[in-house]
Amino acid sequence: MAIDLARLGTDLHLLSPVDYGDDRTTAGDLREGLRQGIDLAVIAGADNISQALLLRLLTPRGALEPLGHSTYGSRLHTLIGEHNTEANRNRARLYVLEAIAQEPRIRQVLALSVTTNRSANPTRIDITINAEVAESGEVINLVFPFFLE
């Protein structure tokens, strides 16, 4: 079966790789292209899907309603100000699954964990997603910190 990479999409490269640190930056400046003649860097394929998922998770659901995308985003932002409890981590898990279900380029979620590392920061939860890309069958792994403060 031939993989139609165009279905995975190409977009501007907007986000730095999310490291496993306490960096709370949700977006950065547009990156310059790496090849001569290209003024902005682009991202494609499975990397584009990872970026798209992260942007969806970081966008409050309903924030793009004025642009006609009333269901785009996630409800993760509703957890800000809540305590880092098992119940709230389970809510985060639910909100992540809801957001991923809106992404047609994801066939299925293979694994999802929401964990805490209170020694690093008591308000931080780490969200780890393993998902299968619909078109290619490739597995993407996305790990990012989310802060409840």
Image (tube, rainbow, N blue to C red):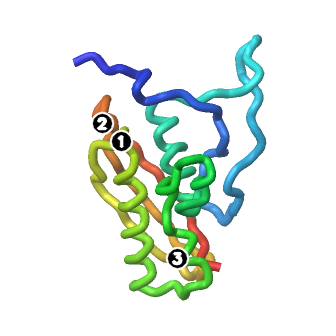
Q: Quadrant of the C terminus?
A: bottom right
Query: Whole-percent x and y of residue 2?
Result: 27, 16
Query: Whole-percent x and y of residue 56?
Result: 52, 52
Q: Indicate which disc, 2 or 1, sits on the residue closer to the N terminus.
A: 1
Q: Residues within 10 Å of mark 3 (few under 14, many from 20)?
A: few
Work out how far the residue at label 3 is from the one at label 1, CA to CA, in angstroms. Answer: 32 Å
Up-down: is 81 above or below 78?
A: below
Q: Is residue 83 left or right of residue 13?
A: left
Task: Look at 44% across and 72% down and name the residue there.
Answer: 92
Disc 3 and disc 2 in contact, CB within 8 angstroms: no
**Looking at the image, how many numbered discs can be counted on the residues?**
3
Query: Whole-percent x and y of residue 67?
Result: 61, 47
Q: Between tags 3 and 1, which lies in front?
A: 1
Q: Indicate which disc, 3 or 1, sits on the residue closer to the N terminus.
A: 1
Q: Where is residue 13, by image quadrant? A: top right
Disc 2 and disc 1 in contact, CB within 8 angstroms: yes
List the residue tagged with mark 1: 104
Q: Quadrant of the N terminus?
A: top left
Kind of residue at disc 1: Pro
List the residue tagged with mark 3: 117
**Image disc number at residue 120:** none
Nearest the eye: 128 or 83: 83
Q: Residues within 10 Å of mark 2 (few under 14, many from 20)?
A: some
Q: Is residue 98 left or right of residue 80?
A: left
Task: Look at 66% across and 66% down and name the residue there.
Answer: 22
Q: Secondary structure at mark 3?
A: loop
Q: Between tags 2 and 1, which lies in front?
A: 1
Q: Secondary structure at mark 1?
A: loop
Kind of residue at disc 3: Asn
Q: Secondary structure at mark 2?
A: loop
Work out how far the residue at label 3 is from the one at label 2, CA to CA, in angstroms. Answer: 32 Å
Q: Where is residue 39, by image quadrant? A: top right
